[in-house]
Amino acid sequence: MQQIGEAIGLAIGLLLAADADLLEIVTLSLYVSLSATSIACVIGLPLGAILAVTRFPGRGPVLVLINALMGLPPVVVGLIVYLHLSRSGPLGFLGLLYTPTAMIIAQTILIAPIVVALSRQVLEDLHLEYAEQFRSLALSARQIIQALLWDGRFALFTVALAGFGRAVAEVGAVMIVGGNIDHLTRVMTTAITLETSRGNLPLALALGIVLLALAMAVTAAVHGLRAGTAGHADA
Amino acid sequence: MHECMAKYDSTGTRACRIELRALTYDVAGTRLIDVPALTLRPTGTTVVMGPNGAGKSLLLRLMHGLIPPSAGEILIEGKPLSPEQCKAQALVFQKPVLLRRSVAANIDFVLKARGKDRSRCRDLLDRVDLGSLADRPARRLSGGEQQRLAIARALATDPDTLFLDEPTASLDPESVQAIEGIVAAAARDGVRIIFVTHDVQQARRLAEDVVFLSNGRVAEEASADAFFNGPETEVARAYLSGHLDGLVET
């Protein structure tokens, strides 16, 4: 209990002092996780919508596979990305290993299946409601997908949040491909791991509290945005 | 106007003849629709009547191409119902399904999807007396307003034929009157109306001819005058008098 109290005090102190190292780590964490979430959404939302609307042979196994990929172990993703980006790997010539870009790639791979699977479920439920009306209006598949993505936008915010939550809290993949290099690839989770291994538990806990506060702030911001615009659509 | 769909009669009114030939629709071995032959008049307002479970909504969905028949065919102006012909029709459901956006955006969505003139949005809303509610979320309208919006959206597609599946069920009398007025105006504009209802008084107000269904079969098809003044079948007489007990399979 004493350590927790000390940690909270330290966290508040770090935030109030606008500690440069802390701000750098927080900024990089946000940059990596928000970039990965954005890319995963750009890829995953249309894919989820296509899976929600279309029927094709083998759709069932595809859905099972995507649902299974939601539970991808971060260290395995990190290892696979590492093998591809390492100097001897097929993409080694890009020189991306131990850079924030490599961390974004790893997190994107990690959360894209979450975005696809959850958006597919959300949009399939919505499509069930709209399907007969859409057929009556003789809409094309493209028009249907566009309409579903727009009308389901508030639920899809939550999907994106789930992806962001997974990304910002993830440590295994970014540790492997980022290397936790100070001032270059150190993010909140890898910093917490490092401080814990050093036995600096109050600082690790303080960073954990900041990470939690950060996740809550992003969630609150999305919730506020949703509440502010929901009146125009009655989602 | 949709190419090769409706024709024009001698008065310049759009004409759209719908023929059903040996049409059946079965589910799990049960025949729900069985229409050996039916030719609907090419213009005006046809009311499809019948007790609950008679197959009225199913028949509408078959004619609109939403569900494929088990056997038989549907001809529009002598040609088998095609996706292009379905585009020349519109259907208003009993419970309107509106998009999660504003009243105007619901209309604009259809105008854009169909490549129609999007500046017509305001005019369409005014036609159903929703112009003042254009920016309101569609799903926050009252039941009657939602149904009027659904009709405006259907009319936005410039349909030759407008199917309405009990559009006034569970609405208050004022909303019923408003919707009947909109439908009558559309009919005057030359839109072929096929209107499903089990409200006899409403059918009397709207119908030029009546198709009476019972147990998935056409029990009677006649002009409105002939049907209401002298129904030929026992089941239609019983229905009009409100004493249907025992005459309809359940």
Image: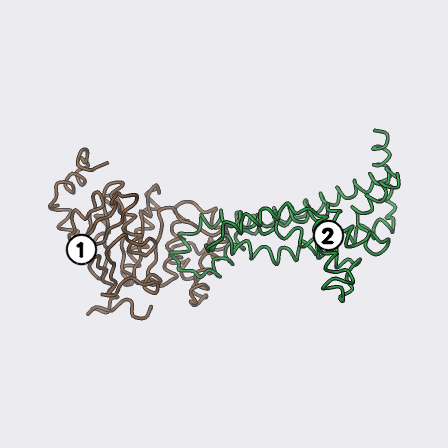
Q: Quadrant of residue B79?
A: bottom left
Give the residue type at disc 1. Ala
Reading the image, the residue beneath label 1 is B37
Q: Quadrant of residue A149?
A: bottom right
Using the image as rendered, state which of residue A150 and residue B193 is in the foreground: A150
Q: In the displayed structure, would residue A92 be above or below residue A110?
A: below
How many marks the image carries: the answer is 2
Characterize the local packing of mark 2: few (<14), some (14-19) or many (20 or more) Cα atoms within 10 angstroms.
Answer: many
Q: Nearer the viewer, mark 2 or mark 1?
A: 2
Q: Could you tell me which residue is drawn at 33 percent across and 68 percent down?
A: B2
Color used for chain B? brown
Q: Could you tell me which residue is drawn at 87 percent across and 51 percent down?
A: A20
Give the residue type at disc 2. Gly
Q: In the image, B247: left or right of A7?
A: left
Quadrant containing the C terminus of chain B is top left
Image spot of residue B225 (x, y percent): 14, 51
Say whether residue A154 is visible.
no
Image spot of residue B202 (x, y percent): 25, 46
Reading the image, the residue beneath label 2 is A78
Color used for chain A? green
Image spot of residue B123 (x, y percent): 41, 62
Q: Chain of mark 1?
A: B
Q: How is the image coloured?
A: by chain
Using the image as rendered, state which of residue B127 and residue A29 is in the foreground: A29
Are the residues flagged by discs 2 and 1 from a single subunit? no
Q: In the image, A57: left or right of B247?
A: right
For the residue labelled by badge 2, is the local secondary structure a helix, a strand or a loop?
Answer: helix
For the residue labelled by badge 1, is the local secondary structure a helix, a strand or a loop?
Answer: strand
